[in-house]
Amino acid sequence: MIVYNTLTRRKEELKTVHPGEVRMYSCGPTVYSQAHMGNMRAYLFMDTLRRVIRMNGYKLLGVMNITDVGHLTSDADEGEDKMQSAAKKTGKSPWEIAKHFTDLFFRDTARLNIEKPEIVAKATDHIADMLEFVEALVEKGYGYETSDGVYFDISKFPSYGKLSGNTRLDDNIAGARVDVNSEKRNPADFALWKKAPKEHIMQWDSPWGRSYPGWHIECSTMSRKYLGDVFDIHTGGVDHIPIHHENEIAQSEALLGHPAVNYWMHVEFMQVDGRKMSKSLGNTYTLDQLEERGYSPMDFRYFCLNTHYRKKLNFTFEGMDAAKTAYSRLLALLKACAASDAKTDPAVIEAFDKEFADAVSDDLNIPLGMGALWTLLKNPPSRDIYEAAMRADKVLGLSLDKCTEEKKEDVPADVRAIADERWTARLAKDWAKSDALRETLASMGWAVKDGKEGYELTKK
Ligand code: AMP
Ligand code: ZN
């Protein structure tokens, strides 16, 4: 398996620390609002990577964090804790907000067929571990106290900036300005720990008084705790490269005396009209909003899979329409395959399997793999093709097996309403009403078949 490593700026063969096992850490959501489709692109990337790793026969241990404290409104330690400001705006507690948006996140990711990593780690569940990490850094001389917190002294870590290539410490590193905090020794020194003003709701005891962790320390701490001192892959969005991940590297390497991560992988942004899709620009869409406009989660997944993860992806409704059309065409072709008794030359199938596996194992070239699937589908329909597509779908995660199911969106709303009413009547054992409604449906051209858990409509 080949992956592109942001650190070395080239594609490399994946060599794991533990034979046959991949250990991977992914930066997860900050749970102060509902994740938007730009965020979802990042988790779709994580999910696809997980699937390709498994396809290559590895055991997988994946960790994702949930940031529920300490992520300030600017990544470079300025502004307010995002959880705290959401609490202020809504009158709810940060704990309630975190719970609500964490649940929503996992509801949305499940709809998108994004699997939950083996371990999901909440920052607030790891305060003691983080505190221990920071105390060790201070003891080693990497951390120093100021009136508002504990900072990492990047001048003590000469390779600071190696991930982004921005090694000029006096530079204006993404908003880190000298005048912001004059007690900082270097402009890009970042907060390990923040002293809590009285009104900061989430705060804990520490050697520096009531306080709370900085954002970056949670990832260094939790990745080490669950994956060990050296692990294989660390993922995130490209926005993490210049600050968050530089800071993680500084913290972990300062503590350990060696690198903690072998491969850094980053997904490019989803854009709208040439600008990043982001809450602050007000150009975001959520999954609910897409569904309201008639797009299914799988339409969106298909839309994303069509562009390589290291390329920018422009979100447009024309693009979504094209994805929706292509996806339903894919299902229709596969439905014909599922129902077919014909055979396909085994050599053709074998060649497809190999082409697909080679493509997706080459730094996740999913678009190329999808191209191979479309080419395969130019053959006359056969069950062999259906089965090959199901194997590919273990990586694509497009629920292609659903092709044989009746498609809800093809049923007009009035027909659906009558069918629902009939189902309710059936459950109430009102057979007369149920039969009458069956007649109504028949007169509208629809046949209904009842199963244990629901009904199926087919056009007559
Ligand atoms: P956040 O909750 O803001 O910390 O972001 C969650 C994840 O989404 C991070 O991995 C970001 O890198 C990623 N992300 C944010 N905006 C976008 C975008 N427009 N396109 C792709 N990924 C994004
Ligand atoms: Zn992180």
Image: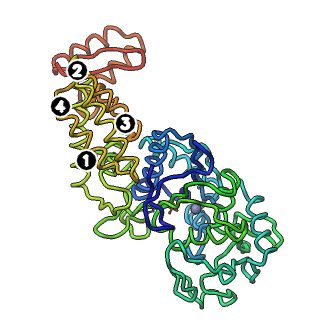
Residue wearing tag 4: 379
Residue depicted at 28% across the width and 35% down the height? 351
- Give the amino acid type for the residue marked by disc 1 in the picture: Ala
Question: Residue 323, how many percent across, how many down?
Answer: 25, 47
Examine the rendering and report whether any part of residue 24 can be seen: yes
Question: 264 left or right of 258?
Answer: left
Q: CA distance from mark 2 to mark 3?
A: 20 Å
Q: Earlier in the sequence, mark 1 or mark 4?
A: 1
Q: CA distance from mark 3 to mark 4?
A: 18 Å
Quadrant of the rendered image containing residue 78: bottom right
Classify the position of the C terminus by image quarter: top left
Q: Earlier in the sequence, mark 4 or mark 2?
A: 2
Q: CA distance from mark 3 to mark 1?
A: 16 Å
Q: Quadrant of ligand 2?
A: bottom right
Examine the rendering and report whether any part of residue 123 can be seen: no
Question: Residue 360, how many percent across, how many down?
Answer: 37, 47
Question: 218 left or right of 36?
Answer: right
Asked if marks 2 and 3 touch (Cβ < 8 Å), the reply is no
Question: What secondary structure is found at the residue carrying circle 3?
Answer: helix
Question: Residue 336, how many percent across, how many down?
Answer: 21, 25
Q: Earlier in the sequence, mark 1 or mark 2?
A: 1
Residue wearing tag 1: 323
> Relative to 441, is 247 above or below?
below
- Neighbour class for label 4 at 10 Å: few (<14), some, many (≥20)? few
> Relative to 180, is 246 above or below?
above
Asked if marks 3 and 1 touch (Cβ < 8 Å), the reply is no
